[in-house]
Image (cartoon, grey):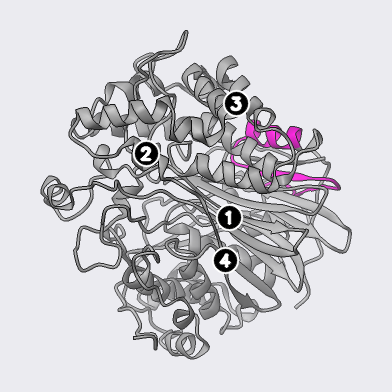
């Protein structure tokens, strides 16, 4: 199948529509020649490209590219800015994964910068504090070692071209000078502050979170200027002292003291042990392209399973209801295996090859009945081998592409903000960021593959995606949003490869999200059923109901898409960011 050739754009400057938090269809004006749901044009550029969830982060990335930085430098710069301007989805208190197209070796390489549970964790005491059998996402028990800064160091050491101080300068400057909140992020910020208040009793020393993120007593509003001098000082220390300043300096000392004062065991020693790991990506063919993912403990394996299942159906020829039915059923099957098998491969054997084996995929695909929906809790197979996140993509003039995803897990994270023993001038007495609650993804079931153990990494939902065609890079892309990520990535790929949509339309196209599958850590997703965006019509809805699908009427998050694509015919980059978010794609 030939690559879609039609990618429209008006100029090198991204057309950033107001982000109203609605489905793309509600935002789209008449665009003759484009699908009705497409909200803007994709963006072309000759030399470099960045697509992120916030315009200031995109601008920082492009400025770094213009200054001679690599795509990795640009990605780190954008990620640092996003941790400031979009703390609702990421920050240096969280973890990071990346896929990089290395033009020197002409290979996709992967980086796992995820942290682990405390080495001296008392699991028995932890279970007593969580009597319901599920990890509480609020407070210190849910905190694992943050890996993002270790990820920056690994990426920059291998692929950086500019000094780290230059790369982090935009984030440091914006943190001091302040920035106006964008609409979608402002709403998420207010929601997080509200949930912190509702769960205040579970968050140790919760006042630090409120002083940092609600300094006037409430969350900052859309358009309001927010500064974070505490974070500026922390980033300056990293800029001059590298990851060691973060993992083996004053922050580590203050963190250990704060956790010890509340009877918890995360320590400076745990932080000092944090190392990002270069990993061999896993991949699977789909039509004439190959989809690449980070290996377990991420859910990238589930994404590949969904793609392999879907590939067995003629997606380009199916009616919309049939196409959505296949996507939902494939997700159910893959997520059953996801709940059973995915965990930290350093501790548990994960049968990656068996779960992607042709014969196994064929057996699972045969379970998809085009006339009847599978149950939401379909059991896992037996292979024969006995929200919130930010995503960004960058590319540079040398041909490097970066697909990077970073998250604090649920929203802003655990609610735990570390107080600074030596406060900075005009600061708020903190280190300027919140610690992740990724530990809530562990299972408390002692028989589960993803059971919590000292020093173990939890199952991870965040997954960067990359697609190659032959021996050429094609696409760096991602879809934010927890369990939506594997579903969203495959839907975007089907839109591009099977339906021939352009890069922008592939992300703006209405999505389906299935909920109700078993989960590796939390027992089960929320209310079972499928959510369909508003552009999906009544006839399709009726056809899906007739097959036994329960249609959810309450709005569900369907993720946030960014993408950078290499156009080998014209030898240019294309960028896209969907209208569901505040983001922007920009090149030069």
Q: Quadrant of residue 369?
A: bottom left
- The numbered mark, 1 or 4, whose residue comes first in the sequence reads 4
Going by the picture, which residue comes out furthest to the top?
425
Instruction: Give, as a single range, the part of the protein colored magenta.
Output: 39-64
Tell me how far mark 2 sits from mark 3, CA to CA: 27 Å
Spatial CA distance of label 2 from label 4 is 29 Å
> Mark 2 to mark 1: distance in Å?
21 Å
Give the class, few, some or many, for how many residues have Cα within 10 Å of label 1's Cα (few <14, many ≥20).
many
Residue 331 vs residue 396: left or right? Answer: left
Q: Is residue 165 magenta?
A: no
- Residue to which mark 2 is pinned: 413
Q: Residue at point 51% right, 43% down?
A: 150
The circle drawn on residue 280 is 4
**Which residue is nearer to you in this view: 464 or 545?**
464
Percent x, y for residue 414?
32, 38
Q: Are marks 3 and 1 in contact (CB under 8 Å)?
A: no
Residue 294's disc is: none
Q: CA distance from mark 3 to mark 1?
A: 31 Å
Q: Is residue 526 left or right of residue 588?
A: left
Residue at image mark 3: 240
Identify the residue under disc 1: 478
SS of the residue at dot 4? loop
Q: Quadrant of the C terminus?
A: top right
Real-space Cα distance between discs 1 and 4?
A: 19 Å
């Amino acid at each position: 199948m030939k690559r879609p050739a039609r990618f429209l754009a008006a100029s090198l400057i991204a057309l950033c529509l107001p982000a109203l938090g609605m489905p793309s269809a509600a935002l789209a004006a008449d665009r003759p020649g484009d699908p009705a749901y497409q909200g803007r044009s994709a963006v072309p550029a000759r030399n470099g490209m960045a697509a992120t969830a916030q315009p200031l982060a995109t601008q920082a990335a492009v400025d770094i590219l213009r200054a001679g930085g690599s795509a990795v430098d640009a990605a780190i710069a954008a990620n640092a800015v996003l941790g400031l301007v979009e703390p609702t989805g990421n920050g240096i208190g969280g973890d990071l994964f990346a896929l990089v197209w290395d033009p020197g070796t002409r290979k996709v390489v992967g980086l796992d910068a995820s942290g682990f549970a405390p080495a001296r964790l008392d699991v028995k005491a932890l279970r007593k504090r969580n009597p319901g059998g599920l990890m509480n996402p609020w407070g210190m028990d849910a905190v694992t070692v943050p890996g993002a800064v270790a990820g920056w160091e690994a990426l920059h050491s291998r692929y950086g071209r500019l000094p780290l101080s230059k790369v982090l300068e935009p984030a440091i400057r914006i943190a001091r000078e302040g920035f106006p909140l964008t609409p979608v992020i402002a709403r998420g910020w207010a929601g997080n502050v509200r949930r912190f208040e509702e769960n205040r009793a579970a968050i140790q020393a919760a006042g630090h979170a409120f002083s940092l993120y609600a300094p006037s007593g409430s969350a900052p509003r859309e358009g309001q200027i927010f500064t974070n001098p505490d974070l500026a000082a922390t980033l300056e220390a990293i800029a001059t002292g590298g990851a060691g300043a973060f993992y083996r300096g004053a922050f580590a000392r203050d963190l250990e003291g704060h956790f010890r004062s509340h009877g918890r065991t995360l320590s400076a020693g745990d932080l000092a042990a944090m190392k990002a790991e270069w990993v061999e990506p896993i991949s699977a063919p789909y039509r004439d392209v190959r989809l690449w993912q980070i290996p377990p403990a991420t859910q990238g394996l589930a994404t590949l399973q969904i793609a392999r299942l879907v590939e067995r159906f003629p997606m380009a020829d199916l009616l919309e209801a049939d196409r959505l039915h296949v996507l939902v059923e494939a997700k159910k099957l893959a997520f059953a295996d996801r709940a059973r098998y995915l965990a930290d491969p350093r501790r548990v054997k994960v049968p990656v090859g068996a779960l992607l084996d042709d014969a196994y995929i064929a057996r699972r695909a045969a379970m998809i009945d085009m006339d009847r929906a599978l149950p939401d809790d379909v059991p896992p197979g037996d292979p024969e081998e006995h929200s919130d996140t930010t995503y960004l993509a960058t590319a540079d003039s040398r041909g490097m592409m970066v697909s990077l995803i970073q998250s604090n897990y649920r929203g802003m994270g655990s609610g735990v903000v570390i107080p600074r023993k030596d406060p900075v001038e005009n600061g708020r007495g903190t280190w300027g960021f919140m610690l992740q609650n990724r530990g809530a993804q562990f299972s408390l079931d002692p028989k589960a593959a993803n059971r919590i153990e000292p020093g173990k990494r939890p199952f991870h939902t965040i997954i960067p995606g990359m697609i190659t065609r032959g021996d050429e890079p094609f696409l760096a892309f991602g879809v934010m949003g927890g369990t939506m990520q594997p579903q969203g990535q495959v839907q975007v790929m089907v839109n591009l490869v099977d339906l021939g949509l352009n890069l922008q339309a592939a992300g703006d196209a209405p999505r389906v999200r299935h909920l109700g599958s078993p989960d590796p850590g939390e027992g089960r997703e929320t209310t079972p059923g499928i959510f369909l965006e508003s552009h999906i019509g009544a006839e399709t809805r009726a056809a899906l109901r007739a097959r036994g699908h329960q249609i959810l009427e309450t709005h569900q998050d369907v993720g946030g898409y960014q993408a950078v694509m290499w156009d080998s015919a014209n030898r240019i980059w294309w960028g896209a960011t969907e209208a569901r978010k505040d983001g922007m794609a920009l090149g030069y």
